[in-house]
Amino acid sequence: AKQNGRARWMMFDQTMQEGALRRLTLEAELRLAVDAGQLYLQYQPIITPQDGVIRGFEALLRWRHPVLGMISPVEFIPVAEEVGLIVRIGGWVLEEACRQLCVWQQGRDLPLSMSVNISAVQLAGGDLVDTVTRVLAESGIAHGSLKLELTESAVMADAEHALAVFKELQALGVRLSLDDFGTGYSSLSHLRRLPIDTLKIDRSFVSAMDSHGDKRQIAEVVVMLARTLGLDVVAEGVETLAELDILREIGSDFVQGYFYFRPLDGAAATEALAEQGAQ
Ligand code: C2E
Ligand code: CA
Ligand code: CA
Ligand code: CA
């Protein structure tokens, strides 16, 4: 038994070492990734569920490493946050997403929005408003077409600071979304005071909502809450027609998910927009 325990310990130790090594590797490689052109964006359409029309996109960061292959943002964004790289990377994401939106918006009557994820570290740091101001000026997009997505937990971690930053962003004309809504602990009084435009219902409530009455009810409550506060609702992670039907019924303004589109490379997103324009 003793032998066994020791073997297990050594295995655990080895796994830990491999984990630590991978993390160190990612950190070092991530420092070079931006300049090496290894980072790029995919765009997932955001759609009105009644007519299936694309109203905007969410920009999602991708890292293709020449040796390690595709690395998920779920893995590398926390690393970028810990070592402070997220500020530079996040600035690049904003620039790239706004540049792409400007191209798509040209010669189109229907306004499109671009949603960009902002990390808690960017929110806490001092230069988010300056960065957004600069990027808006450089890209020339309508300010109201940029939406910043902040997770409910990032905002509630320091709601007073978030409120101050949000007011400045609102003054710029930028719109704000609470991402992963329902997974954190929003106080209703904070929610009422924050100048936000949109609640994004987290995928955990959408996934299989047709066979879980409680998920459907939570989604309904979020839609009602949004109505009361004058906010839009986006449901994320819609994969099936059954989920879409429920979201149509309860009145979600927008949906996003594999049922319509997976995140698309720039060229594929351009094509999806063009096909729609041709209808
Ligand atoms: P998120 O903001 O909640 O983004 C939604 C995630 O759900 C994306 O994963 C998207 O690809 C995935 N998704 C969309 N529709 C479906 C669906 O129907 N089914 C399923 N199973 N998944 C769906 P992704 O691209 O891996 O991104 C994961 C997270 O990484 C994001 O979650 C966000 O928190 C973070 N992230 C991605 N890009 C950025 C970025 O540019 N900056 C920051 N700070 N975070 C980012
Ligand atoms: Ca998001
Ligand atoms: Ca989300
Ligand atoms: Ca989510």
Image (spheres, helix red, strand yellow):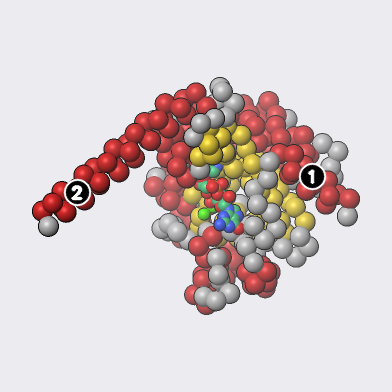
Question: Which amino acid, mark 1?
Answer: Glu
Q: Quadrant of residue 168?
A: top right
Quadrant occupied by the N terminus: bottom left
The local crowd at label 2, few if under 14, some if 14 to 19, many if 20 or more residues have their Cα within 10 Å, is few
Q: Along the horizontal axis of the image, is 279 left or right of 219?
A: right
Is residue 67 at all visible to an observer of this figure? yes
Q: Which residue is nearer to you in this view: 158 or 203?
A: 203
Corner quadrant of residue 248: bottom right
SS state under label 1: helix
Task: Give the x, y percent position of residue 110.
Answer: 81, 48
Outermost residue toward the left in this view: 2
State the residue at coordinates (74%, 39%).
267
Q: Where is residue 5 drawn, in percent x and y?
A: 16, 53
In x, y percent, where is residue 17? 29, 38
In the image, 17 versus 27, the foreground residue is 17
The residue beneath circle 1 is 271
Label 2 residue near ligand 1, CB within 8 Å: no
Q: Is residue 196 left or right of residue 123?
A: right
Please indicate whether residue 76 sits to the left or right of residue 37 in the image.
left
Q: CA distance from mark 1 to mark 2?
A: 55 Å
**Label 1 beta carbon within 8 A of ligand 1:** no
The residue at 62%/37% (across/down) is 41
Instruction: Please report whichever mark, 1 or 2, sits nearer to the chain's N-terminal start.
Output: 2
List the residue tagged with mark 2.
Answer: 7
Q: Quadrant of residue 48?
A: bottom right
Tell me the SS state at disc 2: helix
Vertical placement of 53 versus 147: above or below? below
Looking at the picture, does residue 252 appear above or below residue 36?
Answer: below
Q: Nearer the observer, disc 1 or disc 2?
A: 2
Name the residue rendered at 73%, 51% in the picture: 55
